[in-house]
Amino acid sequence: MAAPGRALPQPTPETQHFWDGCKENEIRLQRCDGCGKVYFPPRPFCPSCGSRHVSVFKASGRAILWSYVIHHRPVAGFTPPYAIAVVQLAEGVKMMTNIVDCPQTPEALQLDMELEVVFEKQNDDITLPLFRPVGG
Amino acid sequence: MRRNAVAVVGAAETTKLGVIPELSQIQLHADAALNAMADCGLRPKDIDGIACANETPVQLAHYLGITPTWVDGTAVGGCSFMIHVRHAAAAIEAGLAKTILITHGESGKSRVGNPPRSVHAQSLNGQFEQPFGPMGPPSMFTIPVLRYMKTYGVTEEQIAQVSVVQREWAAMHPRATFRTPITTDDVLNSRMIAWPFRLLMCCLVTDGGGALILTSADRAKDFPTKPVYILGTGESVETPMVSQMEDFTSSRAFRVAGPTAFQQAGINKNDIDHLMIYDAFAHLPIYGLEDLGIVPRGEAAAFIAARNTAPGGSLPLNTNGGGLSYMHSGMYGMYALQESVRQMRGTSPAQIPGAEISVCHGVGGMFAASGTIIFSNQQS
């Protein structure tokens, strides 16, 4: 799955903490100090109430499979067919990812299945959060 | 905005639709614009407002020889043209311009004068979606659908029916790209693109364009064409990232734009004679029917499979064959608007007899944006 050639993110000042967290094998989310909203993707204010008072915290790394497609066309860094998935983290936010350590089939990829994060280093700057079945 | 204060008086597509390597993208705009001007007897000097999306209004105003007092470059994907119509109607009512041209041209297939799309690695999409292997709309716009299917027990066969029914409408249109009837098995056996989506559940990729000319309802009476009035309009946006949709079974942008237009128009679902719902992929008419409040949640796929939207059905939908069969240059909304105008003029090859109200609902990006226009050929 992680063959060279996959498109990689370039962090910005507002997202650097998230990518630094991935390098240390943590998913770092943000929570509003005022209204308690947990949100993603990163930004230095709460998209629910507009407060600039927000805190970074370590997420559990647990998620469920929310939805996906199994892509059959060639993309640099991937071997088709492969799933492009959206997971819902235990903290409530959704993120796009890939599901690893699991056959890339409709039978194996059941919505709502329990997942846990696994970190895959791409280079010295970027580590990506991927997910695998719990106990798989 | 007041109902029916503004009307479409000029409407045309490019001279050709399909594969047009002999024209660059800006010339596709111009070809459509000149056809629309010819449709209603105007010349560039008569136009004082211009809107377009994939080129800038600066480029088009200069290229066409227009000196505008009003411009709109709203570019939120394929429903930009619905939103241009809404903004143009407001501008005409406010006296900012008298005669507004909305153009679209897109070299989606031949890609002449159409720069390649790219996702910047520092954008939110570039950081949080692109690393996971999507390649454009067929692998992104389709991601929410499994959640919809599980929530409501909808089958792949039912989604395939959307493509089958729309091909029946396309068969009536001489300019449609694909006109040969297809079966559910044809759809399910076509090449897998991004499971559960097969090739025939995905839109075409073609070249073409279209243009509309709007003016006040009072002036519209002086034009040679039958006025098509703007009865109601709506617009909204949600998120540039499909992964961040609030609800994977419904579009928030649809739920804002649609009801806003219905409320302004003062109509309800029973008043709709003709309906266009932008169909870049086969699930979009399903989401649209539900988010517009026309069909209860979870029932739209069965509603289509039961032939309610097919020729002879109670609610004619996507009567040009849609993006799945008619044409789709990348930003399809202009072609949906053209079919609504044809239906209101009484000139569609798949004409619905006696149709007086047409609802034209667009999507932009991948559930990123929405625009809804309700047309009528009756001024009161």
Image (spheres, helix red, strand yellow):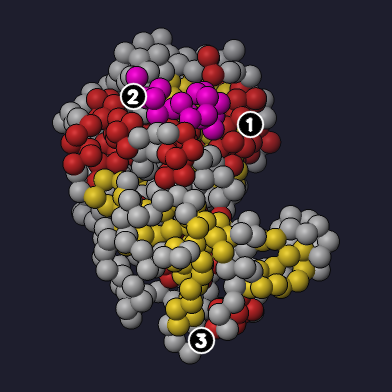
> Which residue is at the far left?
B180
User: Relative to residue B125, is residue B102 depicted above or below?
Assistant: above
Element at badge 2?
Answer: helix
Q: Residues within 10 Å of mark 1 (few under 14, many from 20)?
A: many
Q: Same chain for marks 1 and 2?
A: yes
Residue drawn where x is 26% and y is 36% of the image = B325
Q: Position of residue B235 (x, y in %)?
A: 59, 40
Q: Position of residue A2 (x, y in %)?
A: 36, 76
Q: Residues within 10 Å of mark 2 (few under 14, many from 20)?
A: some
Element at badge 3?
Answer: loop
User: Relative to residue A110, is residue A118 depicted above or below?
Assistant: below
Pointer 1 and pointer 3: residues touching (CB < 8 Å)? no
Q: Mark on residue B260?
A: 1
Q: Position of residue B312 (x, y in %)?
A: 31, 13
Q: Mark on residue A125?
A: 3
Identify the magenta region.
B289-306
Identity, as a three-letter code, of the amino acid under mark 1: Thr
Q: Quadrant of the N terminus of chain B?
A: top right
Q: Position of residue B51 (x, y in %)?
A: 51, 46
Identity, as a three-letter code, of the amino acid under mark 3: Asp
Cα separation between marks 1 and 3: 46 Å
Residue drawn where x is 74% and y is 58% of the image = A37
